[in-house]
Image (cartoon, rainbow, N blue to C red):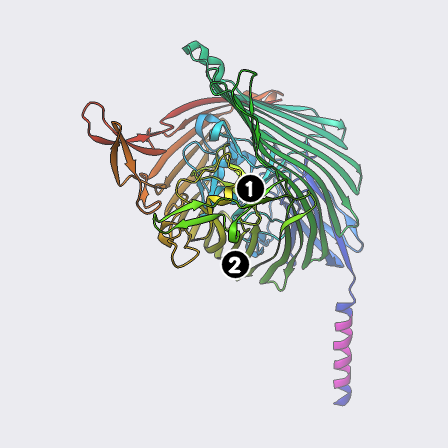
Amino acid sequence: MKKNILLSLLAICTLHFSIFSQEKFTISGTISEASSNETLIGVNVIFPEIGNGVVTNEYGFYSITLTEGTYTIQVSYLGFKDIVQEVVLNDDMKLNFQLSESSEMLEEVVITEKTEKLNIRNPQMSINKLSANTIKQIPVVLGEADVIKSIILLPGVTSGGEGASGFNVRGGAADQNLILLDEATIFNSSHLFGFFSVFNPDAIKDIKLYKGGIPARYGGRVSSVLDIYQKEGNSKKFKTSGGLGAVSSRLLAEGPIVKDRGAFLVGGRASYAHLFLPLFDNDNVAYFFDLNTKLNYKLNENNNLYLSGYFGRDVFGISESFENIYGNTVLNLRWNHLFSDKLFSNLSLIYSDYFYGLELDFVGFEWDSGIRNFNVKYDLKHYLSDNFQLNYGINNIYYRFNPGEIKPDSEESGIIREKLIDKYANEFGAYIDAEHRISNKLTLQYGLRISNFIRLGQNELNVYENDNPLLFNQELQIYESAEPIGTESFSRSDQIENFTNLEPRIALAYAFNDNTSIKASYNRLAQYLHLLSNTNSPTPLDVWTPSGRYIKPQLLNQYAFGFFKNIKDNEYSVETEVFYKEIENRIDYIDGAELIANNAIEQDILNGEARAYGLEFLLRKNEGKFKGWLAYTLSKSEQRTPGRTPLEPGINNGEWYNTPYDKTHDISFNGSYELNEKWKFGANFVFQTGQPTNFPTGQFEFQGLSVPVFDGLRNSERLPEYHRIDVSATLTPRKNQSRKWQGEWVFSIYNLYNRRNAASIAFSRNQDTFANEAIRTSIFGIIPAVTYNFKF
C-alpha cells in the first residue's frame, strides 16, 4: 500500500515537473496590407486551441509568448481575408503576415474552429473604432466625407451645433477632448468655422475614440481622446486617389522611395466655392486648403523611421474690410526600435502650432494669436508573457501661449501696437500600464500616470489685495474686477505655480463565455489647459490659457460599467454602458465677462464643478449585405459654481444648471446596403434634444430701441429638438474591374425632408406690426451633392 502511494506521488511530481519545465517561446512580427505594405493596427492574432491572442499595436507589431507545441494561428481583420496557418513552436520565431482585401478574388478560407472574441475579453471599454471606408460611406453635408461628423453618430457623442466640427463626449466640453493626428495635438479641428473637419479621409488609416477606460499613456484632457493615424504610403507601387466635389476636391499620391523599404504619401484638399462668388457680384471670400505628408523608411528589421506632417489654413473675408486666417501646423519625427521580440519602443519629436490672425481694414489693425508646443515622447511596450503586457513611457511638453497682439495695418492707422503678455508652461508625464489576463474569464488593465505642470515665468503678473482678483459688490449684488495693487516680474525659468497629480486607471472584463461579458472601469485625469469661450461650440476666436496662480487644473473622476454580447457568431453585437463623471475646477464666467484681448482673465472667472451621467446603448450589425448600427444615449450634463463665501451667490445662485452641451436624448442610426457590385446605399437618422439656451425674460425701451433683459436661471430654456435624415447612393461602374483607373459616383442628400433645425433663436420687434416675435436661424436645409472619387 505504501509502495503504491509512493509511486503515485512520484508520478504526480514527475507530471508537475514536466508541465512547469516546458519551455516557452515567442512568436512576433508585423502585419501589413499585401498591396501596399501599409501596416495594420488592431489586427487579431488568435490561437483557438488555447482561447488566447493579441492585437497589433499602432505600428502593426505583435508579440506573444507560449509554451512549446503545435498551434493553429488565425490572423483576422475587418475587410480582409483571414489567414489560418499551423505553426510548430520549438524556438523563438518571427512571422510577418500580409493580408489581402476581401474584395480580391482569392480562395475562400473557411474557419471551423470556435475562436475567441477578443473584444469580449478585452478590458478596454468605452472605445469606438471607425475605418476610413466606413466614414466614406456615411452621407454628410455637401458630400464631403468627414471624420468628426461620423463619430457624432456614436453613442455618448453629440455635435457642437449645426455645421460645427466641434464635438462633445459624455456631457463634456469641446476643450476637454484630446485630438491627436499621428500623436500631434490638434487644437482646432474645423475648416470654414465648422463646415468641414481638418482630417482628409483619403490619408487616414485608423481612428479610435476613447470615451472612458482611457489608458495611462494618454493625459492632458478629461473628457475623451480621439487618436488618428495617417497612412504610411505604398512601398510597392505608385498609386493616386482623390475626389471631385461640389465645393472642394482632394488628391493623394503615394509610392515607394525604395521598393519594400521606404514610401511617401502626399495629400491635399482645397475648396473653391469662393471662385464663383464674383459671378453674383459678391467679393467676399471663404475657402480652405490643407496638406498631409508622410515619409517612412525601414532601416533594418529592428528600426523604422517616420516623418509626418499636416498644414492647413482657412481664409474668410468680407469685401476688403475684413480678413480672417487661421489653421494648424504639426510635424512629427518618429523612430520605432525593436529591442527584442518582446520589447517594442517608439520615440517621437513633435511640433504643434495653432495660429489665428485677423485683419480689420475699416478699423486699421491686425490681430495675431495662437498656441505652440514642443513634445518629446518615449513609449515602450513590453510583452512579458501571453498573459501579461506592460506599457510604460514618459513625455514632456513645452508650451508658448500668445494671447494676442494688436498692431496697425498701415502708417495711417490710429491703432497703437499692443502685445498681450505671453504665457509659458511645461507639462511632464510618466506612466506605467499593465494588461493582465488573470484567468480565462477575468482580465485586468491597470496603470498609473503621474503628471506635473509648471507655470513658468512671464514678464508681468498682476498682484491683488488678499490675492483676490474678483470682488463681489454686496450693495449691487454683482461681481466686479479688482484693481491690481502692483505687478510681479519673473524670468522664464522661474516657477509661478507647480501642480502634481496622480492619475490611476483601472479596467476589468469578466467573460461568462466567448460571447458575453461585463466590464467596469475607473479613470482619474488632470487637464491643465483651459479654453476661454462662452460660446456653445468651438470657434477660431477661442483662446487657450494655462493653469496658474488663479486658475486651477481640472480634475476628473469617471466610473463606467457595461454589458457586452456577441450574437449569432458576431453577426450582431450589443454594447450597453452606464457612466458617471465629476469634474473639479471647471471654470465659469461671470455675467458680462470679456474673454478676448483680456490681459487679466482671472478678473472674469470663477472655479466651479461639473458632473455628467447617463446610459449608452449600441446595437451593431457587423456582417452581410446590410451593415450598420443603432445608438441611443440618455444623459445629463450639469455645472455648478457656488459662492466663495456664504455672502456670495456664485453663478446661477450656486445651483446646478444645464451645460450648453446637455442633450437628454440622443438617437442615431447609420446603415449601408450593398445591392450588388455596382450599387451601394447609405442612410443616417439623427435625433437630439434641443440645445440649452437662454431666452429673455423681459425688455425695456432705450432711445427708441427695444433691449431684451436676461435675468433668469442659466440655460433654463432649450432650442427645439434637432432631427434629420441623410441618404446616399454610390455607383461603381463594372468596367472599373478590368482597368487601372477606378472611379465611383457618390450621390447624397443631406437633410432629406428639409428640416429647418434651429442654430439659434433671436427675439425682436416686428417693424410692421410692432409685435414681439421669435426668429429662428437655420444653417442648412436640404442639400443634394455629387462627388466623383477615383484611384489609379
Observer able to see residue 293: yes
Q: Report the side of 448 relative to 781 (left or right).
A: right
CA gap, disc 2 and disc 1 = 36 Å
Is any part of residue 733 visible from this angle?
Answer: no
Range of residues picked out in magenta = 5-17
Compared with 554, 531 (above or below) is above
Outermost residue toward the left in this view: 769
Q: Quadrant of the C terminus?
A: top right
Q: Nearer the viewer, residue 294 or 441?
A: 294
| Percent x, y of residue 222 | 53, 49
Q: What residue type is labelled 2?
A: Lys
Q: Which mark is residue 519?
A: 2
Residue linked to disc 1: 545
Question: Which element carries disc 2, helix, strand or loop?
Answer: strand
Q: Residue furthest toward the front?
A: 485
The residue lying at 71 percent from left, 41 percent from top is 348
